[in-house]
Amino acid sequence: MNTSDFAELKMFITGPTLIRKEVREAGALPEFGHRDKENDKRCVPIFKNLKKLAGISSNEYELFLINGSGSTCMEASIRSLVRDDETVLNISVGAFGDLYHNISKNNGKRAELLRFPNGRAVELARVREALEKFKPGVLTVTHNETSTGVLNNVMAVCELAREYGVLSVVDGVSIFGGMDIGLAEAKPAMYCTSTQKCLALPAGFGIGFVSRKALEKAETVSVRGHTTDILRQISKSRSHQALTTPNTTLLNQMAVQLDYIINDEGMEARFARYAKMQGMVEQWVEAQDGYELFAQEGYRSPVMTAVRAPEGVSFGTLKNVLKERMRERGYLFDPGYGKLNQELEAAGERSIFRIGHMGDIMPDMLEDYLEELGEELARL
């Protein structure tokens, strides 16, 4: 294999994300035994820094690392928290809310879908109606919908769920580490995320923050699986270990990257950087003739932006023409979520593309990208 043929592109997609040189180099650090005291040298600070990023104290939530991805963690929440005799209400504003519904159904759960139009955020009045109609034991909601760039008000959804005695589970895969997620205030039963988005790490772990209420509920669920059993996961994570053999290379990288986020860049500076880049992209979109922001105003993601293309710029043009032209310039362009664009075009609506400004993308890098992307848009 000739690895020199592997292109190194500047990635402005919505994950995986750009990985810093220092994090790449950490991938060459020594392997270690995951049941050995060497594990503590990596995982004690990893767990500590993840809790800092989540804004929680040591006794509010426990966390675990599950081999796989954010979807694996989401599946664990369904397997461990939804009994067979109750309903799970899956609230969706896009493709990844739909994914939670599919996970629920594929695990044999009695699942109801509350779907909002693409590009729109959750409406609390309709959530209340669904809670009264379906009387679920658990609801799921997406914090940051990666397919559309919508940022939901999960704090309000979780508060409403508590009013009805319903456990709330949040998919925070593409926003954790990108803003103050308000976990201590929102108080979901469980919050699921992963490594490859705002943390700017390789994919490989799902990350679950679990409340005491969730652990108590899991005790009442008879069949939770093995790796998807959050009680088993937490039993090992209390010793700063994973339930099953983890990717120790990724743990080395996590230790280095999380230390950088907390102690070098700093959480507040990181969050402010994302907010600044959101403003840069939105201002740029407004200056492009015929292009529009897709997500509902007031509910737009700070770490990614969905842009509606003008008439005549099809998904095929975005994928087969614009993406390849940007590749020639050294960039990996995101032509939008394929299934969503196919649905939009079938309905006679305009396609969207996405701009990822998450992870360790810096404002000067984004400025260069937007300038070159604007030049290519003008050529279409």
Image (cartoon, helix red, strand yellow):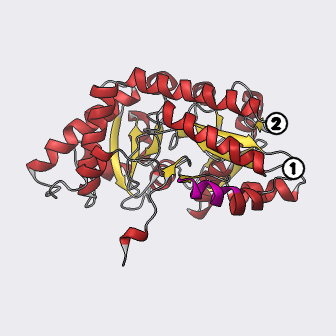
Up-down relation of residue 218 to residue 44 (above or below): below
Please report the residue visible at 28 percent of the width from the left and 58 percent of the height from the top.
Answer: 247
Q: Secondary structure at mark 1?
A: loop
Q: Is residue 41 visible?
A: yes
Q: Main secondary structure of the magenta part?
A: helix
In this rendering, the label closer to the viewer, 2 or 1: 2
Q: Secondary structure at mark 2?
A: loop
Up-down relation of residue 244 to residue 159 (above or below): below
Please report the residue visible at 70 percent of the width from the left and 50 percent of the height from the top.
Answer: 112
Quarter of the image with the N terminus is: bottom left
- Residue 54 shown in magenta: no
For mark 1, what is the residue? 349
Q: Is residue 141 visible?
A: no
| Residue 61 position in % (x across, y down) | 36, 32
For mark 2, what is the residue? 289
- From the viewer's perspective, tell me whether residue 309 is left or right of residue 142: right
**Mark 1 surroundings within 10 Å by alpha-carbon count, few (fewer than 14), some (14 through 19), many (20 or more):** some
Residue furthest bottom in the image: 1
User: Along the polypeptide, which appears first: circle 2 or circle 1?
Assistant: 2
Q: Which residues are magenta?
A: 322-330
| Residue 133 position in % (x across, y down) | 76, 39
Of residues 351 and 128, the one nearer the viewer is: 351
Please report the residue visible at 63 percent of the width from the left and 38 percent of the height from the top.
Answer: 371
Q: Identify which amino acid the numbered label 2 is placed on.
A: Asp
- Residue 329 shown in magenta: yes
| Residue 205 position in % (x across, y down) | 37, 52
